[in-house]
Image: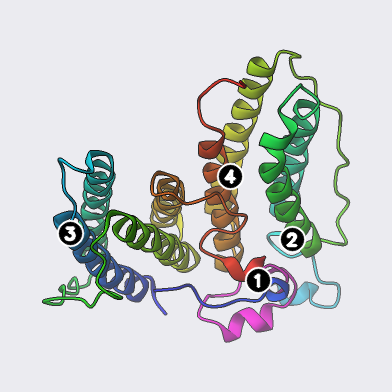
Amino acid sequence: MTVLDALQQTLAAEHAALYTYGVLGARTSQAATTELYDVLTAGYRRHRARRDRLRLLVVEAGGEPVAAAAAYGLDGRPVRPAQLQAAALELEATGVATMLALVARSTGTVREWAMAEATWSASWQLELGGEAQTWPGAPELG
Amino acid sequence: MPGRPLSRRTAVGSALATPLVLAACDIDPPPRDDASAASPPPPEDAELVATVVAALVRAEGVLAATAAAPGLAARLEPLVAAHAAHRELLAGAVADTELPGASPARVPDAPDRALAAVRRSEQRLLRQLREACVAAASGDLARVLASVAASTAQHSAALGSGTAA
């Protein structure tokens, strides 16, 4: 797999993550659950920036960035605040694994950026009720 | 998109010890000098791994010294356990290399200041992990180091910025 392939796969995953974050945010009441709303909004912005960066990286690598699908399926139908938070937590756990895969398949500044994003997604899980792990994104090592 | 599943045994070990396994993956193996094939040099990343193990040993020394401060042992226990697992996995990949032993660290007696020393120590470890991750020739090793960095960042965030109380 080339770096371009890896970037495209990561971008495709990021399209799905951004869509899901948007749905979760739309189902969250800013008035009733301000803290969760703020955490989801900040997460959405981070992932939007991540997607934009991935698009640029794909272009720099000589590719045409993969487009987002019209919609993505969500497991179940999270509506309650606890369910929304849990769904976002799962999103970030997947996000760490996604960025670690890019770390393995890239070098230099792309790898450095992917590692920084993996670290962010790992740390952000604590804002979403998650706990620190020994091998975030790579549980098979434990 | 999950990462390729790698067992604990193969993740670092194959990356360092068996280039043929790497060649079968989608990551280019590090270049080898055929002339020295009869007496293979230490794998390209072995020194790097040893450096990271030394950094973990240093950080663990600070944790051990800090856990003696009143009320901090339980709070630091998850981080202590995580770093022990990190070190064990990485040290196992360079079993033939001489690795440093723990050297006693000095930390302040006051819990708040001791905790601040841990935070500084973990930030230093994080920087070392980032440098090693970028420098690693093996992509699989880089992935392992990035996971260690992510874990370190998580535990640091869990320690929080509050006081020891």
Q: Name the one closer to the observer, B125 or B29.
A: B125
For residue B40, side relative to residue A87 (left or right):
right
- Determine the residue located farthest toward the left in the rendered image: A70
Task: Write down the residue under mark 1.
Answer: B11
Q: Quadrant of residue A87?
A: bottom left
Q: Quadrant of the C terminus of chain B?
A: top right
Residue type of the residue flagged with mark 2: Leu
Q: Quadrant of residue A52?
A: bottom left
Task: Please give the chain letter of the residue carrying mark 3.
Answer: A
Question: Magenta segment range?
Answer: B12-31
**How many numbered marks are there?**
4
Q: Earlier in the sequence, mark 2 or mark 1?
A: 1
Q: Name the one closer to the observer, A114 or A56.
A: A114
Task: Write down the residue under mark 4.
Answer: B152
Residue type of the residue flagged with mark 4: Thr
Task: Please give the chain letter of the residue carrying mark 4.
Answer: B
Alpha carbon of mark 4 to alpha carbon of mark 2: how far?
Answer: 15 Å
Do the residues bearing badges 2 and 1 touch, measured as CB atoms within 8 Å? yes
Q: Secondary structure at mark 4?
A: helix
Q: Secondary structure at mark 3?
A: helix
Q: Secondary structure at mark 2?
A: helix
Task: Please give the chain letter of the residue carrying mark 1.
Answer: B
Share a chain, discs 1 and 4? yes
For residue B106, side relative to residue A17 (left or right):
right
Task: Write down the residue under mark 2.
Answer: B89
